[in-house]
Image (cartoon, rainbow, N blue to C red):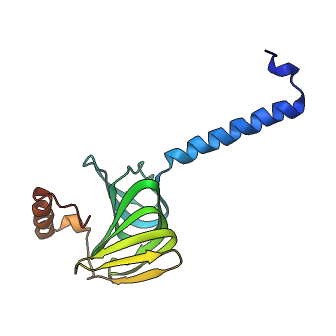
Amino acid sequence: MRNLHHLPSRQLRAVFILFLFLLAQTTVAFAAVTFENQTGTVVIEQPTGEVATVEAGQTLPPIQNDSKLELVTGSGQISASEGETLHLVIPCATVKIQNAVVNADLGLETGNGTVEVLSGEVEILKDDGSIVTLEAGRAEFISCPARTQPLGADPVENVGRQKDAEEGKVSGY
């Protein structure tokens, strides 16, 4: 076998390009669930039960598959790769994101927001039990009661979530 310094520059360049390509593929594989361009506040609940409140400008923890991301107020772009799931929780609906990219925004004081699908398809489970399926290029206006604090901060609501947990229900999904 020949040493690399004996390879012609064209072959060496091909080996380097192949290395960069493989490195890029590895990096993409680890970025399965992301939340970018964040404004406002989010609460991330990992499947392990860990909860983190993150304000705009703070570093987000890695978001694990099957996490819940509560959009308290503000906006951002959320994506989940194929085989990954993220549950985007807003006051009156849960958006199931799988193999899709969405923009979402919510005003805490107004309760109004939108979910816009940039690629893929998502399901929105509303509090009234209805399910809306959105494809790429579509958006849904969401009008929820105005809030002054995150969903989990309301003791009455926590009782309801606790009941659901005891019955094996997971926030709509």
Please, is residue 142 above or below residue 2 in the view?
Answer: below
Q: Residue furthest front?
A: 1
Q: Position of residue 88 (x, y in %)?
A: 35, 65
Q: Position of residue 93 (x, y in %)?
A: 29, 74
Comparing 7 with 111, the one in front is 7
**Quadrant where the C terminus is found in the figure:** bottom left
Q: Position of residue 56 (x, y in %)?
A: 44, 62
Residue depicted at x 14% and y 63% = 164
Residue depicted at x 43% and y 76% = 134
Comparing 67 with 39, the one in front is 67
Please, is residue 74 above or below residue 1 in the view?
Answer: below
Apparent side of residue 140 relative to residue 157 in the rendered image (left or right):
right
Apparent side of residue 7 relative to residue 49 in the rendered image (left or right):
right
Quarter of the image for residue 7 reads top right
Residue depicted at x 12% and y 67% = 160
Quarter of the image for residue 73 reads bottom left
Q: Position of residue 124 (x, y in %)?
A: 34, 74
Q: Residue furthest top?
A: 1
- The reply to whether residue 71 is in sight is yes
Residue depicted at x 31% and y 51% = 46
Callout count: 0
Apparent side of residue 124 relative to residue 34 in the rendered image (left or right):
left
- The reply to whether residue 75 is in sight is no
**Quadrant where the N terminus is found in the figure:** top right
